[in-house]
Amino acid sequence: MSFFHPESMHRVSLFFRFDDAPLLSVILAKSGVFEACHAEGVDDSFPERQGVAYRRIFQHALSNWQKINHFLALTAEHSVPSKRTISKTELLNMDHRLAEMWKRCLQYREDKRHLDKQLETNRRLFKALTHFHQLDFNLSDLKDHFVHLDVRLGIIPSGHLNRLRQALSIEGYHLSNYLKEGEKIHIIVAGVRSNTDMIQPLLESAAFHPLAVPREFSEHPKVIYQHLQEQEHELQQKKQFLQTTFVQLQEELGPKIVAMTESLLLARSYALLSQYMCRKGQLMTLQGWVPERKKQHLQACIENGLIHPVVIKERSPRNDEYQQTPSYVKHPQWLTPFTALVNNYGVPGYREFEPTWLFTISYILMFGIMFGDVGHGLGIVCLGLVLRHKLPKFFSFFMAIGLSSTFFGFLYGSIFAFEHELPALWMSPMHDPMLMLVLALGWGVSFIILLNLLSIYNRYRQRDFSEAIWGSKGICGLWLYLSILFTLLLLAQSQFQTYHLGILLLPILAISIFKWQKGQSIKSYAERLLVIMIETYEIVINYLSHTISFLRVAAFTLNHSALAIALFTLADMTNGAGYGVVVILGNLFILVLEGAIVGIQVLRLEYYEGFSRYFKGNGFPFNPIQLSAKPLADIKK
Amino acid sequence: MSRMARYSYLNTLIAILAQSLFSPRQISQLLPQSLQQLSETLQNRGLANVLEPLSQAGNRLLPAGNMDNLFLSVLLNECRSITRAVSGKEQVFFKDWVRRFELQNIKTILRGKSLNHSVEKIRNELTHMDSFSVLPIDELLHCDDINEILALLNKTPYAAIAGYSQLHYEQKQDLFSVEASINWQYYNGLEKKLRLLASNDKNQIQPLFGAFIDQINLTWLLRYRLIYKLSASHTYFLLVPGGRYLKPAQLMALSRVDSLTQIFPILPENLRQQLRCDKSKLQQLTQKQSNQPLEASTKPQPSAEVDNILLIEQCLESHYLQQAYQVLKMQSFSLAKAFAYLLIREKQLFQIHALLKGKLLNLADAQIALAMGEGL
């Protein structure tokens, strides 16, 4: 196992009997070291494809399982499944049972929705009643069936009001609104009865919800009110009943769902792997990736698990296969937060330098340098301890940067922004700002040279020799960078002579010729020349700007001391009364704001000045099929 | 901030993108070209991505969905650049404009589910919206019925549209009302977003947007009245506000028509002019298609009506596209310029799509021209 590049992978081809496919799938999933890939070179010899119907049933069953799980808010965890296969018939039965269960859930949901609607209608009627009472409106009129007049009462979305009013006017109807509730509006529609058929579809399109006028509405308002209260009571009872039904559903379906989880997990392995399997008659083949050091384990799992023989062929990835080879990287647990930050930029390719260790060390180091303070460092450590249960993955991150900050705090003699209370093991940055700037520049130059070497190494490993030698991030690029540095040194010492330009021009010429060769797709010579000139200029500028960018390491070191001076100036201005308060609040301000800014600035240096120089991050992680690594609820259909 | 400062990037971007547009004359000149010549011409118009899969397939017709998605991806990429060049309400407007295509996905899923199509079949018919996609496609595809789909849509940015559509579905249980409601809600929402723009931007886009809405309204109106036989009031209700020439009074009057011939006296003068200008071409094309001239049809048969409505749709489309060309040419540093570009580009991509498809199927040039809406 290497810390600095993904583990060596092997491509394995398995040849096995057709009827062993389901069991082999389970064995492969249980081994946890096999990632299937599309088979190559077997289209003619193994033309048949497998498991289409099985996959469709599985997906349907999984979909229903997930919906029920989500609907019933089930959280029960499933056990690690045993090693058995799920036949298509068993899966189909399970799918039917799940479909039935989901139907029951849907029925419950519909009942609940209707009840909610009834409750809402009742609430509206309460409101409407008050409104009618104020208007002294004879409600029994609404229920009378006039011979020539069609009168309706109902609710529409308020956005439809004007349009509906205009549309109804075409048919000679009149619309009047009398109550607005949020996005809904209560209306009365009246018109000539002969046009009833014409307006019915219109009202439906306008989402007109007719309000059922209770018989009590023709009575005295007090009686109506009492009736509505009774109705409300009845509905509340129904609601309670529905709640009980939900609990019953949970209790009844919950264990069944949990019991099916194991079967679904087992079925999943064949459903997933069957799409990569190719068949001819009784023989099948499956191809995939396995870490080299897990080969034996996989072989043992297959041989112990299957009765019939399996032919296993394996080989290293070919040169043209690196883009398709997954990257398997394993780091200690405490590196998880740093790995997450690296993966946020990109996953290292199979033949690429794995930058997590370099990233971690340089991040911790730069954070400490830029935010060196014993008090603040220990503050971050305490923060990590306090949040260790809420953010367990970031515990090591807080510890590492906190301790680094503490260490540099001792070197600078800085504690809670007090610059003279603690004897410095080295010196306070403010004592010699120029030295700090020179050291930061030196760190930047060394870092960029190291990254360029890594870039050459990456290109060498990817067999891209021309880029490794002639590219702007290859040997010629490094040569150019060293030439720029040498020229700047000569200029600084006033020893620059015109012929020294040659030192700079030679690598530029080499890179330009290389780019000229590469840019042959640009037909026009003038255009190609212009593009190369701009790109070469950009390379030089990038080297300079990236180097200067590292001055921010010193700038933030000085910034910390400057903030401390500002803080104590403010504290002194309070004439003793609020000194303590200002110092405490100021320290909190520095800890939170400067700490966050430094964290982001270091990340910026790592990403833009660091990764952009050597790390493509265009790989994809090794993702072996597993039986229990991921709950079924998280699986995408 | 001045308009010039605010839209300088957008203006430059549109100027660059507009180089890939054809003039109406150039589009006509594409028709007689061979596939080889077309490839060379289109290569220089930012369509290399479309041509590559075609040439890889040996210049054979790709499956319909793939072909549509290739062309749409060109448009979406450009829309992405345009939405990045603006911010705030302007960005919301353009993003909502692009959602027209995703709306089609909702309808495809609804139709597919109502016809009990398999998940794979429906998925193949969907449009790839790339980063513009906000729909949980997988979950939608695995819904069991229309109600479940609409309930799920309620949790997406399409909640407003889905909410009303759900009400319609509950009441009528038919897909037509759901789709009509989706269309209505969408264009209403778009018009509201337009009204939220700064007054300068709004005033500049409004005429072009209004002309676009006029085309939609008149086409829907004729379809609802003459094909689906909806009542006048129902038809009027399903039209959207914000038209340029067709104001509510005209729409109300138009909603009462019973045949195509009755629309001409009611139409505003400029639209009538536009349709008259195209009348002779319209008649020729109509005769080619159904041997039934527009004005001779006293009681049009449904199939003839469909053809004629399509032609009227194309006439009005060419009307707003003429305006879009004017806006693109005359205006600078404005949102209207970007909107005009999108309208023209969409139409031209559709025309090139039809042209390539026709050529690959060895259709006659006249048929391809008809499909492209050429000659109007």
Image: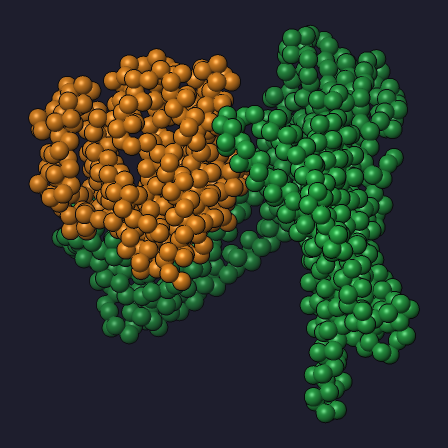
Image hue for chain B:
orange
Whether B115 is drawn above or below A105: the answer is: above
Query: Which residue is at 72% across, 35% downward?
Result: A476
Q: Position of residue A131 (x, y in %)?
A: 31, 70
Whether A302 is drawn above or below B105: the answer is: above
Is residue A252 found left or right of B251 in the rendered image? Answer: right
Q: How many marks?
A: 0
Q: Position of residue A417 (x, y in %)?
A: 79, 75
Whether A50 is drawn above or below A370: the answer is: above
Q: Position of residue A237 (x, y in %)?
A: 52, 59
The C terminus of chain A lies in quadrant: top right
The answer to whether any part of residue A324 appears in the image is yes
Residue A570 falls in image quadrant = bottom right
Query: Which residue is at 37% across, 68% downward?
Result: A127
Is residue A17 found left or right of A223 in the rendered image? Answer: right
The answer to whether any part of residue A269 appears in the image is no
Query: Which residue is at 38% across, 34% downward?
Result: B20
A71 or B209: which is nearer to us?
B209
B214 or B334: which is nearer to us?
B334
The N terminus of chain A lies in quadrant: top right
**Colour green belongs to chain:** A
Query: Which residue is at 69% across, 63% downward?
Result: A597
Q: How is the image coloured?
A: by chain
Q: Position of residue B172 (x, y in %)?
A: 34, 41
